[in-house]
Amino acid sequence: MKKRVLTGDRPTGKLHLGHYAGSLQNRLKVQATCEQFIMIADLQALTDHFEQPALVRDSVLEVAKDYIAIGLESTVFLQSQIPALSELTMFYMNLVTMGRLERNPTVKAELKQKAFGDSVPAGFFCYPVSQAADITAFQAELVPVGEDQLPMIEQTNEIVRKFQRLYGVGALKECSAMLSETGRLVGIDGKAKASKSLGNAIFLADSAKEIKQKVQRMYTDPGHVHVEDPGCVEGNVVFAYLDVFFADKVELASMKERYRRGGFSDGVLKALLTETLQHFLGPIREKRESLVDRDVLERVLTGSMVARKVADATLLAVKEAMCLNYGSSV
């Protein structure tokens, strides 16, 4: 039996190289050996974009196009098209306290980042419960996450264990985190992770001109004023991107040494990264531009039908464990 993987993205815009480095390349690796479900989390996106439903809807297609363009062939589905997820979330709400949600490090960090103040949407505050429903509905054994999302996996397993104590073992299973080998990719400004909202990312759909312009804006080493000056590799955004996307690691190590000694210009370095990213993103962009919106949406809706059957089976098992199986109705 292949292990089952659940992963996904919030549709709030096109995906970027940070997504690729942190999760998409892992999905490409595991799709041949695992049964992978990829969720476009439109309901979760609404927890902090509830005033922009059109953005979320339009972004569903953009995200799906990115998936297809990079070669993902797993089951892709829409969160909003799986009613069982909402029902499971409702059941799990009774298994979690407000205090526990407040102590979740991921929630605390994101609340601070979004600066809600006293106006935190209840949906956003409780999204770890919704994530637990997503994961358990598909009986996922592996969930690809970054280190910052480990508390979400822990919270999911706490819910599963409490459910098992109350209602018995069998309906749900615990999951394990699958950490990315690459980790987060820094933004082109060097100040934070690559992010759609911060405008510091290179997108998979960016044109050749946009890629060149963004690489030119990249932070390198402010102390590397002249070519002959010794340069710092650590914290240098150009090298951070080359670490992920430049194939010849031996040559890259040599370049780092030359840069540290002095005699290697930032212009040459940025030209190399531009060429590397153009070579990588060119075929993705070409494939993306060939996609027809209607065909992309049809694929997502077909995947949603497959996903719905899996989630419905879990919901039935949960209801039976909770003595809520009234006759033949689910």
Image: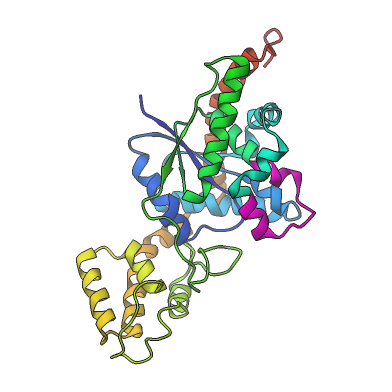
Question: Eyeballing the image, is 314 above or below 265?
Answer: above
Name the one closer to the observer, 323 or 297: 323
Measured from the top left, where is residue 304 in percent x and y? 56, 34
Q: Quadrant of the C terminus?
A: top right
The image shows a total of numbered marks equal to 0
Asked whether residue 277 appears in the rendered view, the answer is: no
Q: Is residue 151 left or right of residue 282?
A: right
Point out the residue furthest to the top here.
Answer: 327
Q: Is residue 85 above or below residue 112?
A: above
Give the vertical position of 64 relative to 113 (above or below): above
Residue drawn 56% across the image and 41% down it? 152
Q: Quadrant of the rendered structure where residue 269 is?
A: bottom left
Image x and y of residue 96, in percent: 67, 32
> Residue 119 in magenta?
yes
Q: Is residue 59 left or right of residue 217?
A: right
Q: Determine whether 175 is above or below 117 in the image.
A: above
| Image quadrant where residue 55 sits | bottom right
**Is the N terminus in the top left, top right, bottom left or bottom right quadrant?**
top left
Q: Which SS type dominates the magenta stretch? A: helix
State the residue at coordinates (37%, 86%): 224
Q: In x, y percent, where is residue 104?
A: 61, 44
Point 49% across, 41% down: residue: 7
Q: Which residue is more in the foreground, 235 or 285?
A: 235
Specify the quadrant of the image occupied by residue 316: top right
Q: Along the horizontal axis of the image, is 206 left or right of 52? A: left
Q: Which residues are magenta?
A: 108-127
Colour style of the rendered protein structure: rainbow
